[in-house]
Image (cartoon, grey):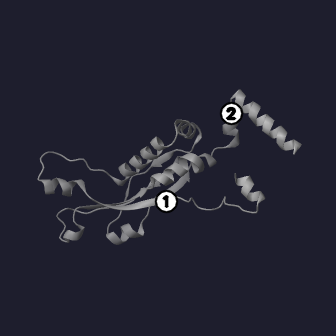
Amino acid sequence: LGDVYKRQGLDFSQLSPISTEHISVKLKNAKAIWNALKAQGTYQTYTCKDLNQLAINLALSSVPEKTRQRFEQYGTQFVLLDDKQASTGFTWVAGTLSKDVTSNGYEIQSTSLFTDPDMKIQKFAGMQYCHILSPARAIDWIYVDGLRAVSYTHLRAHETPEHLVCRLLLEKKKKEQ
């Protein structure tokens, strides 16, 4: 598809992904809800890293099985890092979702902020702030970007006889044109 655009004088290869990169969310934290309900026992706390994993799981379950398998076999995998804790609301707003392709994979790290339910400023008490990966961006990565980093040599190493025949026929057709 990229070649078609280039032949028409258009090159979209350097554009950023079209989907939303991340979502900034403000949630009531589990401890505050537990306290408000005057519940007994323990409660489950979720980190921004946990929410990112849920976004990735949603993306993986939303693509066709063949696409998921191709990505899991050949794609650059998601690697979730522990949250980077912001100390104030200002540092959280200034922070973002860090995304970086490394030798480990597509590393994702959220900036997060948790406020205590007993905080004096009630408007901000008991909140959890996260920058999380957009499931749409995760789907983009699964379909396209995560496969770009795969080397041609790596793909050829996994080539089936059927793929080889198709590739050779396409190369022959290109030479004839």
Depth check, front residue: 126 or 80 = 126
Q: Which residue is mark 1?
A: 21
Q: Which residue is mark 2?
A: 157
Q: Position of residue 63 (x, y in %)?
A: 51, 42
Residue type, numbered disc 1: Glu
Q: Is residue 161 toward the left or the right of residue 112 in the image?
A: right
Q: Secondary structure at mark 1?
A: loop
Q: Residue at x 49, y 50 (%)?
A: 138
Depth check, front residue: 22 or 173 = 173
Label 1 close to label 2 by CB (< 8 Å): no
Nearer-N-terminus badge (1/2): 1
Question: In which quadrant is the C terminus drawn?
Answer: top right
Q: Position of residue 65 (x, y in %)?
A: 52, 36
Is 165 situated above or below 91?
A: above
Q: Position of residue 68 (x, y in %)?
A: 53, 39
Q: Secondary structure at mark 2?
A: helix
